[in-house]
Image: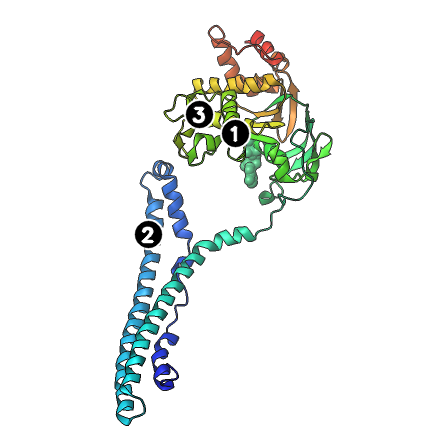
Amino acid sequence: MFYISPTLTLLMLTPYVSNRLTGSPWRDDESSTGVTLCIAHCSSVQCITTGGHKVYEKVGNVLKLARKEAIASGIFFGTTGWSGNVTLLALLAYGGTLVSRGTISVGDLTSLLLYTVYVGSGLQMLTVFFSSIMRGIGAGVRIFELLDRTPAIPPDVGADVDSSRRGPIRFERISFEYPSRKGVQILKDLDFEVAIGESVAIVGQSGSGKSSINALLMRYYDPVRGKITFDGQDIREFKPSSWRHIIGVVPQDPVLFTGTIASNIAYGNEDATREQIEAAAREANCEFVWGMPQGFDTEIGRLSLSGGQRQRLAIARALLKKPAILALDEATSSLDATSEHRVNDAIDKILRSRQTTCIIVAHRLSTIARAERIVVLEDGHITESGTYRQLVNKKDSRFRTLMAAQLNAAAGESLIYKPPEPSLKAGREREEDL
Ligand SMILES: Nc1ncnc2c1ncn2[C@@H]1O[C@H](COP(=O)(O)OP(=O)(O)O)[C@@H](O)[C@H]1O
Ligand SMILES: [Mg+2]
């Protein structure tokens, strides 16, 4: 085009060079995130705000952004379209005079006009592409921010832990505060040991730091003072990803992923065979899976199972790893009596095998009583420790005070209460007591 007529080519390019989209409102993706959250937790939002005001507010923000974008792109595409047409007219007019002067031929002018149309639409496409990129950047900014953060505890630095390694876990004079709440000590001089294959229940009031102990064990955080040792070695020497692999965790509200039941149990254990998955499900009392039309191939969503079923799937997922340590964090606290019984039964089976060290954070007496030892956590340290029998029989024990309501209810129900099989020493002791 420059070869045919540099003047006409420059004339054609002027409007595209001067028009540049400098930003996109979608860079501010806060409102769209808010809407996503509101929609994902629709029922909670509805019952908390009784009218979904927050949703309307967020939707309003998104609408404002959409309007801003519509106006910006309207102005942009309107002006580029308009200037494109004006350019063509100018080319025709000025080109016509050049043809009449004999500077260029009619053929040259025609091809220049055709080029202009092609180049113009190409540039227009480029600008659409540019605005899509701006949208992408807007949506990706936060993800890149997260990816750029260097973790305080790098997951892949340290020594590998052999998955068959077994050993006692020792919390040695641990003091801990969350980095986001400096100065508030959650654990103070916490000191206790869990032997190989032993089961220890941690009890304490809500907010006493039970889950924080699990967080330290999983190395989501490091203690401010003191150390946790496994088989005599400080867990800070282990590669966190490898250390976490030997721990099975069952949280209070387990997360399921969209996919089949089998893929959910095998999550994080992709090499597991169908036999291993079924064995873990059997061990975790997931008998409901066999009753489903497609069994282990049944597709499930995030919340398409009951609390007790999700809990048992989470236990199966943890057991599939054949963990050296099993950490249960209030695995039965939100379950109905039947589900609680099934989950407790599953826990019993694990405790009976005596191959897994269990740290059980629990509220329910029926779960706590299954542990061989109970430690009471108060003000960030252990105030009492002993077997269920010792603590229940001890007059004015902290455990009795904490569990008063449940102990009274259990005493009232003792005539109809059927304890689990007395396979464990602790189980036997509890049976005598209730
Ligand atoms: N991520 C966190 N950041 C700051 N403080 C936290 C965090 N998680 C828990 N806490 C605080 O630590 C204390 C102990 O919490 P937690 O260990 O969850 O108690 P529990 O499991 O016994 O109910 C609470 O006061 C809680 O507010
Ligand atoms: Mg907790």
Residue drawn where x is 67% and y is 35% of the image: 161
* First in sequence: mark 3 vs mark 2: 2
Q: Label for residue 60?
A: 2
| Residue at 53% from the left image edge and 14% from the top image edge | 407
Residue, far right: 232
Mark 1, residue position = 273
| Residue 342 image position (x, y, % from top left) | 47, 18
Residue 236 appears at what percent x and percent y?
68, 39
Q: Residue, x 46% and y 22% (percent of image)? A: 286
Snapshot quadrant of residue 205: top right
Q: Nearer the viewer, residue 351 or 431?
A: 351
Mark 2: which secondary structure? helix
**In-front residue for pair 224/303:** 303
Q: Hey, what amino acid is under mark 3?
A: Gln
Q: How many marks?
A: 3
Q: Amino acid at mark 2?
A: Gly
Q: CA distance from mark 3 to mark 2?
A: 39 Å
**Can residue 207 be spotted in the picture?**
no
Residue 132, image x, y percentages: 39, 60
**Quadrant location of ligand 2?**
top right
Q: Residue furthest front?
A: 107
Q: Is residue 384 left or right of residue 312?
A: right
Q: Is mark 2 within 8 Å of ligand 1?
A: no
| Of marks 1 and 2, the one in the foreground | 1
Q: Amino acid at mark 1?
A: Thr
Residue at which label 3 appears? 309
Asked if residue 217 is positioned above or below residue 182 in the image, the reply reads above
Q: Nearer the viewer, residue 56 or 337?
A: 337
Q: Is residue 424 visible?
A: yes
